[in-house]
Amino acid sequence: MKVICAVLALTALFCAAAAAETGGDHKDIVTMTIGGSEHQLWLEDNATARTFAAMLPLSTKMSELNGNEKYVYLDTALPASPQRVRRVSAGDVMLYGSSCLVVFYKSFDTPFSYTRIGRVADPDALARLERAGAVNVQFALKRSRP
């Protein structure tokens, strides 16, 4: 009996470590490709992120704004639950209003409200976007929750 309990405990620890390594509760993964570079995007568990994932694949041109973000107005409104975030972090992917998709490549304080869609796994890799101007971006669903 002690052996079975020990095996179960080790299995639980292994599963918890694997979940932490792969993004925890985030099960929807999107590949965001910018100029040939792929970036992994972990989606939030909310209606906005699920609706966004259902729109994929998506190819779009994102414009530059304020030296800290790329944005595009989508043809379709998404469900929105904006929150005053106070601080945007590099790698955040959020919705402004109900149809403006924003990818942030710099961190800064903000008075604006956004709905969280997801987070880029390696936000430092987005730093080169500062010099890029408008960029072509492809979003594709890589893995979906069961």
Image: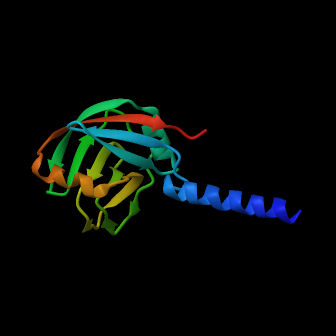
**Outermost residue, right side:** 1
Query: In the rendered view, would you say 74 is above or below 117?
Result: above
Measured as percent of width and height from the top left, residue 53 is found at 45, 37
Query: In the rendered view, would you say 125 is above or below 146?
Result: below
Residue 78 visible to an observer of this rendering: no
Nearest to the observer: residue 62 or residue 29: 29
Q: How is the image coloured?
A: rainbow
Quadrant in which the C terminus is drawn:
top right
Measured as percent of width and height from the top left, residue 84 is found at 37, 65
Nearest to the observer: residue 27 or residue 1: 1
* Residue at x 53% of width, y 59% of height: 20
Query: In the rendered view, would you say 57 is above or below 33?
Result: above
- To which quarter of the image does residue 86 belong? bottom left
Q: Is residue 56 left or right of residue 7?
A: left
**Outermost residue, front side:** 3
* Residue at x 32% of width, y 68% of height: 87
Residue 17 visible to an observer of this rendering: yes
* Residue at x 38% of width, y 38% of height: 77
How many circles with numbers are drawn on the protein?
Answer: 0
Measured as percent of width and height from the top left, residue 40 is found at 37, 46
* Residue at x 23% of width, y 61% of height: 106
Quadrant in which the N terminus is drawn:
bottom right
